[in-house]
Every structure is written in C-alpha cells, then in structure tokens.
Image (cartoon, rainbow, N blue to C red):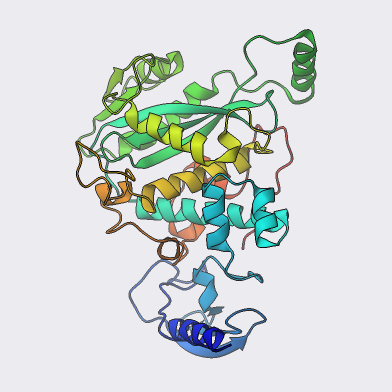
C-alpha cells in the first residue's frame, strides 16, 4: 500500500511540473509547437484508473480545455501501464494472442494498442525528420511478404542510410501471386481476380519512383547516391521515369555474400531483424497479418525500435567502436541519446503539425485502395 501511494505521488508530481507544448485544438494558432505560454491551469479531474486524477489546462486564446494525458500514449485508456509490456513482447516475436494471454486482456485491446503505437511512431518520426537532409548513400530494397494469404504477396520498399543504418522512408507495393501453382491454386487466383481485379503489375516501379522523388528533394547537393540490387523495376523507374533527376545509381548483385562488407548490408540488416523479431514476417508463419495495414504497422514499430530505441549493433563492432553506444537516430542527428520507451512516446504529434506523403497519410488513416480485405478505418483518438 505504501509503495502504491509513493508511485501515485510521483505521477501527480510529474503532472504538476508538466508544460503543454501546444494547444490540442487544430484551429488554434498555438496548435503548432510554440515556446510561448498559451495556457492556464484548470484544476484536476478525477478518473477511474491510476493515478486517479489528471491535471487539466485551458488555452487562453481559444478557451479549449484539455488534459495532461493528451500528449502521451495512454490518452483515453482505461487499462493503464500495459503499453510498454505489449511493445516489448511484440518486438520480441510474440503473437498478439499470446500477448493478450500474458497480460490478461483481450486480443482486441492488444491490436488497438499496437495500431495506436504505430500511428504515434510514424507521426513522431515524420516530425523529427521534417528538416533532415540526406548526406549519405541510400540503400534500397523491398522486403517480400504476404498479407492474409499467399494470394496476396507484397513488397515493403524501404530506403536506409548506408552508414547510419537509419530508415528514412518506406511504402507498400501489392503484387500478384507468382511462381508454380497447382490447378486448384490457379483456379482460386482466377476467382479472386474476377471478384477484385488483379493488383497493379507495375506497383514496385510506381512506389520506387515515389520514394526516390521524396529522397531527392532532401539532398542538399541535388544528387542522390542510390544503391540497389539488379531489380528491373528499379532500373526502369530511375532510367525512364526519373531521367531528369541527378541520381548516381549503383547496382549490386544480390548473389554476393551478405556480410558487413556488402554494400547492401544496411537493408539486409533490417530485413534480417524484421524476419527475426516480428512474427508476421517469419517464414511459413501461421500468425501472418490479416491485411496490408496491419503488416505495415508492424513494420513501423520495428523501424521505430531500430531507429531510436536500439543501438546500431548490440555487440562490439571491429570497424566502429561506437556502434554499441549510438543509435541510427544519433548518427543522423535527430536524437541525442538512445531513447527509452517513455521518452519516445511523449509529446504526441498530430496530423496538422507535419506534412505527410500520400503513402504515410494512408497508413495513418488506415487506408489501402488495393486491399481485398475490410480494414477498420481510423476515426481519431
């Protein structure tokens, strides 16, 4: 009982010393981050979970009232203190059902919390990198996986810094099933294509063009140094669609041994961690994502963990003595240290405070125009 009172008093003290960074009202001129004092304290409100009361504020400009929890991950959550446990278990290759059994709650709660963390992470990443220039070589590739069934393969195209191992950008490419199929499988594929239509056949080329255009705008020298394998869609996107841009494209054979000396190591390293740490991306898994948005949200959580909450390598590295002490975000200058879970998931960023690409906005709003599955749309927190 004494321990509970001490923890409650610490949380109350934390709320009392907090300063809201912006007004939650999107129509207020103080909605974007400002160092000005725009608020007044508005008392406390009793709640039915720990710490049983929360600090309230009022904006002196628009008279909008808001609470302390708005800026944190546990806003409007009845079961308090579960987010970090869910995060750590999911990153440690646990399924959503097994996480639900371990914490004593429903699988729906776990699914909603992970989806919320993914949106929070993506918006925070977009805000931290909004003015980040690209001064290193970019390594690019696609991680092939499937959503719901083998008839829905796809590629998650991702661009990573060659030296920093920082994940700058990624998007999604649906694909049609390929390879050898039995007569039954061919018939099922035809039925799906009659009902929903085939996926775009040039999706990888289109999404590659979009990523390269976004990356090129962030190069101060107006020259993008780009490394990839010999995929023909990458070549077509660069040589035909983006011929007007200055791109130094280096192609590396995918048959070369994939160790640290490989020029594509940065992207191979992320693919290895994704296969190793996330259940939906495991080989021959029975816990695959039920639709494309859920799969992208899982990848977003892994990219966030790798960028901000984890050093470049967990062990000492022969060619880089600081790799065990510095995260990819520290290498590119968007973080001062390896962040903890609480440090990253605070001061929430809203949609009005960042400019998102069409790919990332669809992910935040949980939209996929090519999906064959029903996806519950995001209606706000």
Q: In this view, does 129 lie above or below 41?
A: above
Where is residue 179 drawn, in percent x and y?
A: 62, 11
Q: In which quarter of the image is the C terminus?
A: bottom right
Q: Is residue 330 above or below residue 264?
A: below
Q: Quadrant of the N terminus?
A: bottom right
Task: Tell which residue pokes out farthest to the bottom in this image.
Answer: 43
Q: Is residue 105 above or below residue 255?
A: below
Answer yes or no: is residue 307 visible.
Answer: yes
Instruction: Please identify the quarter of the rendering in which residue 220 is found.
Output: top left
Answer yes or no: is residue 213 visible.
Answer: no
Where is residue 267 drawn, in percent x and y?
A: 38, 31
Q: How many marks?
A: 0
**Residue at image point 63% right, 46% down:** 95
The residue closer to the viewer here, 58 or 101, is 101
**Residue at image point 49% right, 25% down:** 206
**Residue at image point 31% right, 32% down:** 138
The residue closer to the viewer here, 152 or 27, is 152
Q: Is residue 293 left or right of residue 148?
A: left
**Residue at image point 45% right, 37% down:** 273
Q: Is residue 217 left or right of residue 176?
A: left
Where is residue 154 drawn, in percent x and y?
A: 58, 27
Instruction: Please identify the quarter of the rendering in which residue 116 is found.
Output: bottom right
Q: In this view, does 194 lie above or below 323?
A: above
The residue closer to the viewer here, 329 or 23, is 329
Q: In this view, does 372 lie to the left or right of 253?
A: right
Where is residue 324 drawn, in percent x and y?
A: 28, 48
């Amino acid at each position: 009982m004494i321990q509970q009172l001490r923890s409650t008093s610490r949380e109350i003290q934390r709320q009392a010393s907090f300063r809201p960074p912006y007004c939650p009202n999107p129509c207020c001129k103080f909605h974007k981050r400002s160092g000005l004092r725009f608020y007044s304290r508005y008392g406390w409100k009793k709640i039915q979970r720990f710490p049983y009361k929360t600090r309230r504020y009022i904006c002196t400009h628009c008279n909008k009232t808001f609470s302390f929890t708005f800026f944190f991950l546990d806003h409007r959550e009845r079961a308090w203190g579960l987010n970090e446990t869910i995060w750590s278990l999911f990153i440690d290759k646990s399924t959503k059902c097994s996480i639900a059994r371990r914490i004593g709650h429903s699988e729906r709660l776990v699914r909603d919390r992970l989806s919320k963390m993914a949106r929070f992470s993506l918006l925070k990443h977009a805000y931290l990198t909004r003015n980040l220039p690209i001064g290193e070589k970019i390594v690019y590739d696609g991680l092939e996986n499937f959503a719901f069934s083998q008839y829905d393969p796809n590629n998650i195209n991702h661009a990573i810094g060659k030296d920093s191992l920082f994940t700058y950008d990624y998007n999604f490419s649906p694909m049609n099933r390929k390879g050898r199929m039995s007569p039954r499988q061919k018939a099922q594929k035809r039925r799906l294509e009659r009902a929903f239509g085939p996926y775009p056949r040039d999706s990888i080329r289109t999404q590659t063009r979009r990523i390269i255009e976004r990356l090129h705008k962030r190069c101060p020298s107006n020259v993008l140094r780009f490394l990839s394998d010999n995929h023909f869609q990458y070549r077509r996107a660069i040589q035909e669609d983006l011929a007007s841009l200055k791109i130094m494209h280096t192609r590396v054979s995918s048959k070369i041994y994939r160790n640290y000396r490989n020029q594509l190591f940065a992207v191979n390293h992320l693919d290895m961690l994704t296969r190793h740490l996330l259940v939906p991306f495991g080989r021959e898994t029975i816990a695959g994502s039920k639709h494309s948005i859920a799969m992208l949200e899982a990848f977003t959580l892994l990219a966030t963990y790798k960028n901000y909450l984890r050093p470049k390598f967990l062990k000492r590295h022969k060619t880089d003595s600081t790799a065990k002490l510095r995260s990819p975000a520290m290498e590119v200058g968007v973080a001062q240290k390896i962040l903890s879970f609480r440090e990253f998931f605070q001061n929430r960023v809203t949609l009005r405070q960042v400019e998102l690409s069409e790919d990332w906005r669809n992910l935040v709003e949980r939209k996929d125009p090519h999906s064959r599955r029903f996806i519950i749309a995001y209606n706000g927190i």
